[in-house]
Amino acid sequence: MRLRSRKQTEKGAIEIVEEATHLLRSAPARTLTLYYLGALPFILGLLYYWADMSRSATARQHQAEAAMAVSFLFIWMKVCQSMFAQELKAQLGGYKPEPWTLARLIHAGAVQAAIQSTAFVVLPICLIATVPAGWAYAFYQNVTVAGGESTDARTVYEKAKDQAALWPMQNHLVLAMLLGFALFVYLNIAVAIILIPYLIKMLFGIESVFTQSWESLLNSTFFAIAAAATYLCVDPLVKAVYVLRCYYGDSLQSGADLKAGLERVSKAAPYGMQVLVLILAGCTFGATAAEGPEAGAAKTAELDQAITEVLDRREFSWRMPRDEAPPSKEEGLIGKFLKAVGNTVFGWIKTAVRWVKGLIESILPDADPMVPGSSSSSLLRSLTYVLIGASALALAILFWRHWKRRQRPKVVAPVPVASVVGDLKDENTLATQLPEDGWLSLASEMMQKGEYRLALRAYYLASLAHLAQRDLLVIVKSKSNREYERELRRRAKDKAELLSAFEENLAMFERVWYGRLTATQELLQHFTGNLKRMTVQR
C-alpha cells in the first residue's frame, strides 16, 4: 500500500533539476571520481576507435578486437555509473552505501551488459517514432540507477520499467531542459576548440595547420570530441536527475524521503525535543482518530471560513481585481486643459521632426535610380536617422539619470522609542520602525532591565536595519527570516564573513525567540560580536 499518492510527491521539472544540481555540488569528491573512473576510459577509447577506424589504413585488420575493447569499456562505464548512482542515493537517504565486492561488480556488469546493450537498437527506433523516446531514455537511465541495488536482471528490468512510467510530464520537461543545456554546452566547447589554435599562435607564435586553414578543423573527429566533452559535462547531472526520480518513486511505498527527513531532524534536535515531538504527534493522532470524519469535516469548514475572513482584510485587498470606473461622458475643465497641453507638445514634436527631416534632405538628396551612387546616399540617410534617434535616446536617459540624482530622499519621521518598546513582543514589528542606532539603544535599555530576550530581538532588528541601509535587504512585512537569509546570500555572495555572522545570529535568535533556549548575557555578547563583524565587513 502506498504511503502517498503520485501527485503528492510529484515535483516540477525546474525543481528536480535544481535539486539534482545541489545534490551534485554537495557530493564528495569520491562520488564524482567513481563516475569519471568509468566515463573517461570509455570516452577516450571511443574517440581513439573513431579516429583509428576513420583514418588508419590497417583498420580492418584489428576492427573486431578494437570493437570488443570499446564494448568492455562501455560495460565498465555503466558499472561505475551504477556505483555513482548508489553513492548519490545513499547521500539522499543519509545512510552508508554497501561496499562493492568483486562478486557484486561482476553481477552488476552482467546485468548492465544484458539490458544496456539493447539501447543501441531501441533508442534510435524510439527517436524515429518520437513519442516513446522519453520513456525509453528514462528506462535505460533507471537501469543504471537500479543496477547497483539488485543482481537479478529481471528485477532490475521490472523496477526500471515501473520508474519510467512515473510522472511522464516531469520526465519530458526535464529532458527538454537538459537537451537545451547540452546544446548550449556543446556550442561553447566547439567554439573553445576552434579558438585554442589561434590562442596558442597569439601567445606563443606557434603556427599549425589549423591556423593556416580553420576549415581543416571541421571534420568528424572534431564533432566527436565536442560531443564527448559535452557528455562528460552534462551526463552527471542527467544521472543525478534520474537518481532523484528513482528515489522519490521508491519513497511512494517505502517512505525513504520521510525517514531521511526524520533522521536529519533527530540529529539536529536535542533528546528532550524528540520526546516532546513524539508525544505531541501521538496526541494529535489519537485526537484525530477519536473525533471521526464528522469532526474533520467541521474543522475543514472552519478552516475555509478563517481563510476567507483573512483574505477579506484590508491588507490583502491589493490582490483583488480593481473595479473599473465608468467613463465620463463630458470632459471637465482639467481634462480639457490636459488635452490642450498634449496637443501642444505633440505639435512641437512634429515640428522638430519635420525640421530635422528637411535638414537631412537638404544635405542628402533623395535617391534616383537613374543617377549613379544614389543608392549609397539613401543608405547614408537611413543611417543618419538611426544615429539621430540613438542620440536622442541617450540624451533622454542622461537627463532622466541627472533628474533622479538631484531628487532628495524623503525624510521619514522617526518613530518614538517608547511606542516600539511595547511592540518588541509583537511579530508584526518591522526593522524599519527605528534606525539602527535606535534599535541598539533600545537593546541596551532592555539589557539594563534584565530583559535579555527582548534585547536579543532588538539586536536582531538592528542587524536587519543595518543590512537594509546598505541595500542588501528589502524589509517587507510578509518576508520570513529564511527569506531574508536567501536574499542576503544572493546579494552579498562575495561577503563570506558577513554571511556567516548573519546566519549564526539568525540561528541563535530563532532558538531563543521560537525555541526553548534561554537568552543569557554571554549569548548576547556573542550575538553583538557577530553584529560588529557584519558592520565591519564592507
Image (cartoon, rainbow, N blue to C red):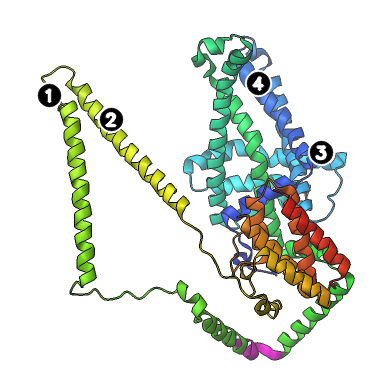
For disc 2, the marked residue is 383
Q: For marks 2 and 1, give the CA distance.
A: 18 Å
Name the residue nearer the viewer: 466 or 178.
466
Numbered label attached to residue 360: none
Mark 2 lies on a secondary structure that is helix
> On the image, which quarter does residue 418 sit in?
bottom right
In reply to whether residue 121 is colored magenta, the answer given is no
- Which residue position is annotated with label 3? 106
Numbered disc in front, either 4 or 1 = 1
Residue 359, percent from left and from top: 18, 33
User: Which of the numbered marks, if any, corresponds to residue 368?
Assistant: 1
How far across and how far down the image is residue 290, in percent? 73, 90
What residue is shown at x 49% (from left), y 82% (from top)?
Answer: 312
User: Image quadrant of residue 531?
Assistant: bottom right
Stretch of the chain drawn in magenta? 291-297
Question: Mark 1 or mark 3: which is in front?
Answer: 1
- The numbered disc on residue 49 is 4
341 lies above or below 152: below
Question: Which dot, 2 or 1, sits closer to the camera?
Answer: 2
Residue at the (78%, 74%) spot, across then down: 446
CB-based contact (under 8 Å), mark 2 and mark 4: no
Which of the two discs, 2 and 1, labels the residue nearer the N terminus? 1
At label 4, which amino acid type do we have? Answer: Tyr
- How far apart marks 2 and 4 lie (CA) works out to 55 Å
Q: Earlier in the sequence, mark 2 or mark 4?
A: 4
Q: Amino acid at mark 3?
A: Ile
Q: Is residue 492 above or below residue 361?
A: below
Callout 2 crowding tier (Cα within 10 Å): few <14, some 14–19, many ≥20: few
